[in-house]
Image (cartoon, coloured by chain):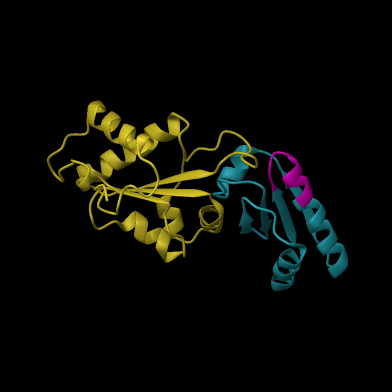
Chain colours: A cyan, B yellow
Amino acid sequence: MKIEILGTGCPKCKKLTELTEEAVDELGVSAEIAKVTDINIIIGYGVMLTPALVIDGDVKVAGKIPSKQEITDWIKEKK
Amino acid sequence: MTMDKCCCNTKSRLIYSCSSAANTGEIADQVSRKLAKEGYSNMTCLASVGAHISGFVESAKSAEENITIDGCPTAYAKKILKHIGVTPTQSYVLTGMGVEKGKTPTTKEIINEISNKIKTTKKDHFSVSGLKI
């Protein structure tokens, strides 16, 4: 599973990264977590608002920090 | 489509333009581009929302303001957003703002006039027809 955190490194992006890492650890899944800061790649996903979370190429949320439970549910969907 | 920097801490205002083949669509597109270039809003892709591309859909759902500019009363920009459960905060229809379909030329003067109207109009002062209510 590939999880991407889209954002240029602001506190909200960092918070989303933390929550995602926690969710992955708690689920015990094998996932690559990548931080994407390149605006051109972010726009390539159609994301106009950051932070955003992408799981296996699917943008799950953009422009806000989801709850850890939401992140957990999205990961479970992809397992 | 434009996004010059991280927008975590900025007001998120996205603009969607009708892309019809008529002069009304051309004017709507040019007005949207002008507003984006001036920094009034970020222009994004209506067709991608219609195609349910996840990044565009999620961005629309999270934006504080979504503005649609339609050329005619068909108002498909507004309808496409409604299709994903998003009600635009502002909707404009150019034929209700003095543009005549098939007649009004796409000139700088027209584009400036329409974009200025949009910038100076407070939210909710325009109905879907573009007429003041």
Residue B56: x percent and y percent? Answer: 51, 53
In the image, residue B41 above or below residue A71:
above
| Snapshot quadrant of residue A48 | top right
Residue shown at the point (60%, 39%) measured from the top left: B10
Q: Which residue is found at the position 76% from the left and 49% from the top?
A: A34
Q: Is residue B131 left or right of residue B53?
A: left
Residue B18 at least partly seen: no
| Residue B94 at least partly seen | yes
Q: Residue furthest top?
A: B108
Q: Is residue A79 above or below residue A23?
A: below
Give the image location of residue B94, x and y in percent. 24, 45
Q: Position of residue A61 (x, y in %)?
A: 63, 57
- B72 with respect to A1 (left or right): left
Residue A74 forms part of the magenta stretch: no
Q: Nearer the viewer, residue A47 or A13?
A: A13
| Farthest-out residue, front | B133
| Residue B18 higher or lower than A23, as above or below | above
B52 relative to B35 in the view: left or right: right
> Magenta segment range?
A6-15
Residue A11 lies in the magenta-colored region? yes
